[in-house]
């Protein structure tokens, strides 16, 4: 997977589209909207961070230093040293603390300065600190709460009962980095009218929209669509037992999920980096898969290995087609943002309405706080 485009590399177009506060039509507002930080956001795969390492994650232009203590615990801090403003993600992990690479200032998991190598005669370390962020680990992903920390316990990471307990379904997280706005990624995953793009892999065929409605902060929809009919992937699906002719989906702000006959499911968790960069975390999970050409299910103990291979050989190439498409859409929008919006699938407008409303509500709350 490609490394996310950094904020400094995200070059705005010469004739940039309007900012969210400047108004515009629904599409323009959706493509400029951020995401409400008062939710839990997946920021990294657990397996990609060894104990004693640090990395930078970005939530809507906000740089955060995520690090893993030598005991395996995760911590997240504002990504700057108070001394000379260096990014702490460039530093080193010592025990459960993060040490700035430049002068060795040491921060604990709460963001408090607990050590300065040279105090120049001072007897005690000054009472200094930076912001820390709540962090949790679930479903093989590291989650961060970038909003008001007092709300962290009132908002929950989505419950996925199939991935809990001894009889949990097999699942291997998959990460995709896109140089495109998060709303384009959501549109892509839930708008099945782009089946033509995937004519090689055929993850679904047809897109007869049966139902869609906005319920609170969620957009519920369903399609008549033939699922899992690829030449290779289709061999693993028990079509004689599972109804693979329809699918339910939901944009459960700020997340997205799908369900095929309670046997094939997925969740998508987007991390909005900026107006033109998004990191997407996919969880595809299956109640069972069969051995190709045989009426025999793959043993549960072997499912993880099978999914690792499937992610590499089938799902990653499939998602790469989506990535190329949404990045091309972003490039096109940057150039033709003022063209008349044309959309044939009504669910896309529903996604955009929720995205715009949620961002506007957040901005209004922040404005009220400032008086």
Image (cartoon, rainbow, N blue to C red):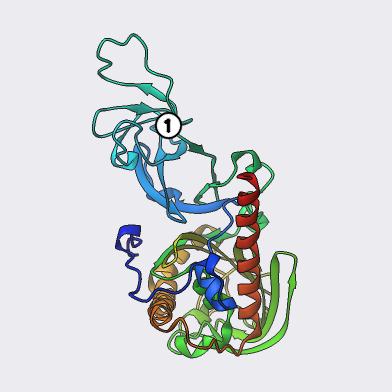
Given residues 60 and 198, the one toward you in this image is: 60
Where is residue 165 shown, x and y percent of the image?
Answer: 64, 49
In the image, is 154 to the left or to the right of 169?
A: right
Q: Specify the quadrant that holds the N terminus.
A: bottom left
Instruction: Please indicate, yes or no, whether residue 326 appears anywhere in the rendered image.
Output: yes
Q: Quadrant of the C terminus?
A: top right
Q: Residue at x 55, y 46 (%)?
A: 145
Residue pictured at 45% horizontal, 48% vertical:
46
Q: Mark 1: which secondary structure?
A: loop
Q: Position of residue 340 (x, y in %)?
A: 52, 88
Percent position of residue 269, x then y: 54, 61
In the image, 169 versus 366, the foreground residue is: 366
Residue 266's quadrant in the figure?
bottom right
Q: Nearer the viewer, residue 198 or 326?
A: 326
User: What residue is at 62 percent from the left and 82 percent from the top?
Assistant: 239
Few, some or many C-alpha atoms within 10 Å of disc 1 (few <14, some 14-19, many ≥20)? Answer: few
Q: Quadrant of residue 91?
A: top left
Q: Is residue 290 visible?
A: no
Name, please, the residue furthest toward the front.
Answer: 371
26 versus 224 height, above or below:
above
Query: Residue 325, percent across and down?
Result: 42, 81
Residue bearing the label numbered 1 = 71
* 100 in relation to 113, above or below: below
The relative height of residue 298 versus residue 132 in the rendered view (above or below) is below
| The image quarter in which residue 36 lies | bottom right
Q: How many marks?
A: 1
256 relative to 86 in the view: left or right: right
Q: Is residue 241 left or right of residue 266?
A: right
């Amino acid at each position: 997977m490609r490394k996310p485009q950094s904020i400094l590399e995200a070059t705005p177009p010469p004739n940039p589209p309007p900012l969210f506060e400047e108004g515009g039509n629904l599409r323009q507002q959706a493509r400029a909207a951020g995401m409400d930080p008062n939710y839990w956001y997946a920021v990294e795969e657990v397996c990609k961070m060894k104990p004693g390492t640090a990395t930078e994650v970005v939530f809507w232009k906000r740089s955060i230093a995520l690090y893993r203590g030598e005991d395996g615990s995760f911590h997240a801090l504002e990504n700057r040293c108070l001394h000379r403003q260096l990014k702490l993600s460039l530093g080193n992990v010592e025990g459960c603390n993060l040490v700035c690479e430049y002068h060795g200032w040491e921060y604990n998991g709460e963001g408090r300065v607990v050590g300065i190598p040279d105090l120049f005669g001072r007897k005690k370390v000054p009472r200094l600190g930076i912001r820390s962020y709540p962090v949790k680990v679930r479903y093989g992903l590291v989650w961060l709460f970038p909003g008001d920390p007092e709300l962290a316990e009132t908002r929950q990471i989505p419950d996925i009962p199939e991935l809990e307990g001894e009889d949990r379904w097999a699942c291997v997280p998959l990460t995709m980095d896109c140089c495109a706005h998060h709303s384009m990624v959501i549109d892509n995953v839930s708008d099945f009218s782009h089946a033509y793009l995937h004519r090689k892999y055929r993850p679904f065929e047809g897109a007869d929209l049966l139902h869609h409605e906005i319920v609170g902060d969620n957009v519920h929809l369903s399609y008549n669509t033939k699922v899992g009919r690829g030449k290779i992937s289709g061999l693993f699906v028990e079509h004689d037992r599972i109804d693979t002719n329809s699918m339910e989906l939901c944009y459960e702000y700020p997340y997205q999920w799908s369900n095929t006959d309670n046997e094939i499911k997925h969740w998508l968790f987007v991390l909005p980096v900026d107006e033109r960069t998004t990191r997407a975390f996919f969880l595809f999970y299956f109640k069972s898969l069969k051995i190709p050409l045989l009426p025999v299910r793959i043993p549960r103990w072997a499912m993880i290995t099978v999914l690792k291979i499937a992610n590499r050989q089938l799902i990653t190439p499939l998602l790469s087609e989506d990535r190329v498409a949404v990045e091309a859409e972003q490039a096109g929008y940057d150039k033709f943002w003022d063209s008349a919006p044309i959309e044939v699938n009504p669910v896309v407008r529903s996604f955009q309405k929720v995205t715009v409303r949620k961002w506007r509500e957040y901005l209004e709350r922040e404005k009220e706080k400032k008086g």
